[in-house]
Image: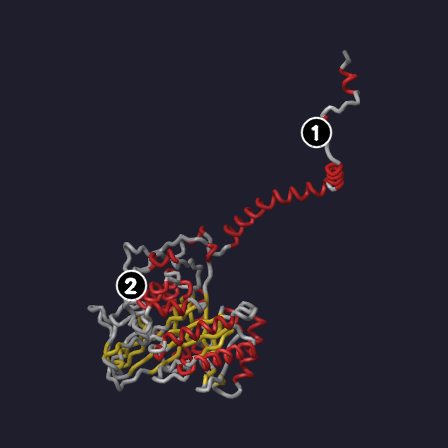
Amino acid sequence: MRSNRNRLTSNEPLLATFRISDHEHQMILLFKKHQNSVIVIIIMIGCAPIAFCLSSLYIHYFETPFSARNLENDLLFPSFDPKTTPASTSTFPTTISYNISTCHHRIVGYYTNSDSLNVTDNQLQKLTHLIFRIVKIDSNGTIQFMNSGLDERFVEIIARAKSLNTDLKVMIGIGDSSYRLHNPITPLVTDPVMRAELINTIIGFLIRYDIDGVDIFWSSTWRRNAPNYVKFIEELRIKLKSFEREYTISLIVAPSITKDEYNRHHLRSAMNHVDFISVLSYNMLDRVGFKFLKFIGPTSPLFGGIRGNLDERMRYFTCATRQPEKLNMVVLFYGTYWNNVTYPFDDSTDDIWSLTDTNNNGYQVSWKEFKRSGWNENALSWHEKSKSSYIWNPETRTFLGLETKRSIREKMKYANVKHIGGVSIWSLDKDDDEETLLNVVTSEKKCLMNGENSVDEDYICYNLNVGS
């Protein structure tokens, strides 16, 4: 019998059944050659998930300005309980909770003064979208600037915008906002050939001036041509998708549009092809027969009244589309005043309006003009039910309904609470030199959570026949 020592020095292999091939042998040699590198790679792969988790926790708790640690104490983040809070409530609860990672908010500024383009660097830096309404479309489908010399100024602003804010989208606005019975764009979108030519003209304008998209004013003239306008938007979107650049299409909808003109079918069809819709709500009008009767009251009430308010209008669009993330609530930088009228507010009723003589026209006053033309800011009063500011002079029987810092703060709170995708300013050129109202809008901009689930939490969608 051989000793153990002899067994260990025997020529027979200890593990003869585990022979390796020449290929496997070469692989072993290769591993040994690069052993250190392989170990380093394995360590990096193993540590990557840990590093990602640690960095996410750091960002969440230390770098996110609106983290879960301070949301509970932030009064600008209230939430509505649909079981206990009416749809048109004017009381804001004090807490809200949601996922920080879903935050975003559009700040869209309209510029409507075609006499001069005095856009400041501060405005360019604070906006996400800047829309110029300084062109017109003729009956033959050509696009022209409203005044001479605007094109050179426009080019200069575009260059400045790109240097100051690379994320800013500069757009052009088309469509008639004057509520004329005849809109020159209507025949163009009705005829397929002219519609195609108009689309090519718009795209040519975007390319020539190197801008990011087009905003379309959907006015009351769309009532009998809604299918053609939706077709126009759809074909425009299809054509823009053929370019590598991502272009933006948006709509701004008129306050005089009634529920019949905005049936859910056409509205949802349009929503499929646009990036966002700005919902105007000002100078509420009540239609009797074929005449618009004029009512004195707040320019854009958030709540109250029996003839529509901003809350009702936003509820209609949110419930009809179920896409609040695509909606912008329009805030105004101006007001309206009347002479020789009666005081409109009567807190013993639900109404916040009084009917005036049809010949007694209201006059618009911008925030800039309000501060320059002798109005006394200390005379401003606050109407709690409508969340609006006003001045009433019983001696001259003058009533002014005006958007102020306080009323705009209330609207910004509302937009945050209702998870509206953004706000649109009508318009930047009406702000004062200190840009007081723009600063209020941007300072009150908060983190929003959007989505299908928030619709039923924010609004009671029992009746869409509102906001007429």
Q: Please give the name of the residue rendered at 76% of the width and 11% of the height, measured from the top-left corner.
A: 1
Q: Amino acid at mark 1?
A: Phe
* Residue corresponding to mark 2: 88
Q: Which residue is mark 1?
A: 18
49 on left or right of 423:
right
- Give the amino acid type for the residue marked by disc 2 in the picture: Ser
SS category of the residue bearing label 1: helix
Circles 2 and 1: CB atoms closer than 8 Å = no
Q: Position of residue 296 (x, y in %)?
A: 27, 78
Residue 140 point in image, percent of width and height: 46, 87
Whether residue 436 is visible to the viewer of this picture, yes or no, is no
Please name the residue shown 40% across and 83% down the image: 187
Q: Residue furthest top?
A: 1
Q: Nearer the viewer, residue 333 or 233?
A: 233
Evaluate whether residue 234 shows in this view: yes
Q: Position of residue 192 (x, y in %)?
A: 44, 79
Q: Quadrant of residue 257?
A: bottom left
Alpha carbon of mark 2 to alpha carbon of mark 1: how far?
Answer: 80 Å
Q: Quadrant of residue 81?
A: bottom left
**Marks 2, 1: nearer the viewer:** 1
Which quarter of the figure is the C terminus placed in? bottom left
Q: Secondary structure at mark 2?
A: loop
Q: Which mark is residue 302?
A: none
Compared with 363, 302 (above or below) is above
Give the mark nearer the N terminus: 2 vs 1. 1
Please say if 464 is above or below 159: above
**Residue 172 spot, x, y in % from top left:** 48, 77
